[in-house]
Amino acid sequence: MPALSSFKPDTLERLAAAGLDPQRLPDHIAIIMDGNGRWARQRGFPRIEGHRRGTQSVRATVEECCRLGIGHLTLYCFSSENWKRPREELDFLMALLEQYLIEERAEILDQNIRFSVIGRREGLPDGVLREIDESIRASQDNTGLGLCLAINYGGRTELIDAVRSLARQVRDGNLDPDRIDEAHLSSALYTAGMPDPDLLIRTAGEMRISNFLLWQISYAELWVTDLCWPDFDSAVLHEALRAYAGRDRRFGGLSGSVGGLTED
């Protein structure tokens, strides 16, 4: 929990205006951005228009997390299962992603954002990979919001890759298999070095986690809205944060205690 002295005055003012307690904010928010196609279909637009409008919600959410002093934001942009979509839609999504990376790089630098990506690189177009690498390089020394995009990502695939990494260490004689614990597995995940999400938000009313951060969200608070992603804005984010602040996070213990020493 950050100390009040770590917040800038303008951040405290914005938090107060939104009815948010700075000492009850999540450090890491993860979002499953669902409903772009549904949003478009409801309005008689092609699916790609929903994806296009969804980038506006990404921009607004990133900007608001910066203003509120959130430490980390992970967005589920493209799953490893999404390759099953029609080729025309896939081509548009990859072009949109490349365009986003190019157009938002100046904002990433201006806002002191640390940019990263999780997921497998195999299958992503060269242009997308080039812009990913450039954004990572350009922002590597930044100290503000940690913005992580999950691209070509799958939670089960991540766990497989982590197990393979640990197996190679055992094979090479650098790791005793009997000493493998949660810390070893966490350090082999794509998200190594990042805190686990405190709050998982999902849009479009779906009650599932869709193979997203399966290990990392073990104790995350879940919040679901019926709004589709293109309708997600700072007001909805504030609603989710207020709901989070009212939760009793038990971490497997009893009410009112992280360690489980306080009874209900």
Image (spheres, rainbow, N blue to C red):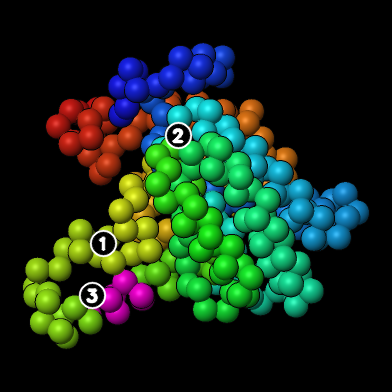
What stretch of residues is rendered in magenta?
160-167
The image quadrant where one finds the N terminus is: top left
Q: Is residue 72 left or right of residue 110?
A: left
Using the image, determine if residue 247 lies above or below residue 118. Answer: above
Residue 187 marker: 1
Q: Quadrant of residue 173?
A: bottom left
Residue 227 appears in the rendering = no
**Label 2: element kind:** loop
Assign the magenta stretch its main secondary structure: helix
Separation (CA) of disc 1 from disc 2: 23 Å
For image coordinates 23% across by 35% down, the residue present is 258
Give the mark, 3 or 1, whose residue is nearer the N terminus.
3
Looking at the picture, does residue 115 appear above or below residue 98?
above
Of 260 and 166, nearer the camera is: 166
Residue positioned 48% across, 56% down in the render: 136
Q: Which residue is mark 2?
A: 70
Q: Position of residue 188 (x, y in %)?
A: 28, 66
Residue 105, x across and y down, in percent = 60, 49
Answer whether residue 148 is magenta in the image: no
162 drawn magenta: yes
Question: In what element is the residue under mark 1?
Answer: helix
Residue 34 percent location from the top left of the image: 64, 53
Q: Looking at the picture, which amino acid does disc 3 mark?
A: Leu
